[in-house]
Image: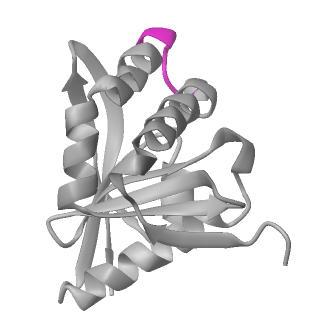
């Protein structure tokens, strides 16, 4: 099949593609739900290279590739905290996020947990809702002096 989605463990060599995808997805996809100032501040998180290196080295961090290009990534923190899920702006609605989520959820179960938790953006909430995640609460989080609205969600296995 053409354009087959390959999943593999992230490596430090993927850092540039990961941070570019993170920034571009926020700018182009999340901009419909957040202010211009919020988008600018959120996207600037791509510049914290040390934090991204730590995520790749310390978390269960996987990437999705199509024809050797990174088109999505997801990572798991502390065994059952789904800390990040991003899909390239040009590859939305192709099943990439669903595939990454299934692998992350499998990892949570293999880690011996019965619940997976996440903080999800307004933009991502419908996707998580469609995958049987329940909203625990709506929250306001402060990041670099701005307040962001998002949701704490969880799913039981």
Classify 84 as above or below 3. above
Residue 153 left/right relative to 92: left
Which residue occupies the foreground of this view, 36 or 155?
36
Residue 14 left/right relative to 32: left
The answer to which image quadrant residue 31 occupies is: top right
Which residue occupies the foreground of this view, 130 or 63?
63
Q: Which residues are magenta?
A: 33-37
Image quarter of the N terminus: bottom right
Q: Position of residue 81 (x, y in %)?
A: 23, 63
Q: Position of residue 2 (x, y in %)?
A: 85, 71
Q: Please identify the residue farthest to the front as the structure is shown.
A: 13
Magenta stretch contains residue 36: yes
Task: Give the colour scheme shown.
Answer: one colour
Magenta stretch contains residue 35: yes
Q: Please identify the residue farthest to the left as the structure is shown.
A: 78
Q: Position of residue 153 (x, y in %)?
A: 32, 59
Q: Is residue 131 visible?
A: no
Which residue is found at the position 61% from the left and 61% from the top?
65
Image quarter of the C terminus: bottom left
């Amino acid at each position: 099949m053409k354009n087959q989605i390959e999943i593999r463990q992230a490596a430090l060599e993927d850092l540039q593609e990961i941070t570019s995808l993170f920034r571009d997805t926020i700018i182009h996809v999340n901009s419909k739900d957040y202010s211009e100032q919020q988008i600018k501040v959120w996207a600037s998180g791509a510049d914290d290279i040390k934090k991204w290196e730590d995520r790749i080295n310390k978390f269960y961090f996987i990437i999705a590739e199509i024809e050797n290009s990174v088109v999505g990534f997801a990572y798991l923190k502390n065994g059952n905290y789904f800390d990040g899920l991003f899909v390239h702006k040009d590859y939305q609605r192709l099943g990439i996020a669903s595939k990454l989520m299934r692998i992350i959820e499998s990892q949570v179960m293999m880690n011996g947990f019965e619940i997976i938790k996440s903080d999800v953006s307004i933009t991502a909430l419908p996707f998580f809702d469609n995958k049987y995640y329940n909203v625990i609460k709506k929250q306001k989080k402060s990041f670099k002096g701005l307040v962001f609205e998002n949701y704490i969600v969880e799913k039981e296995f």
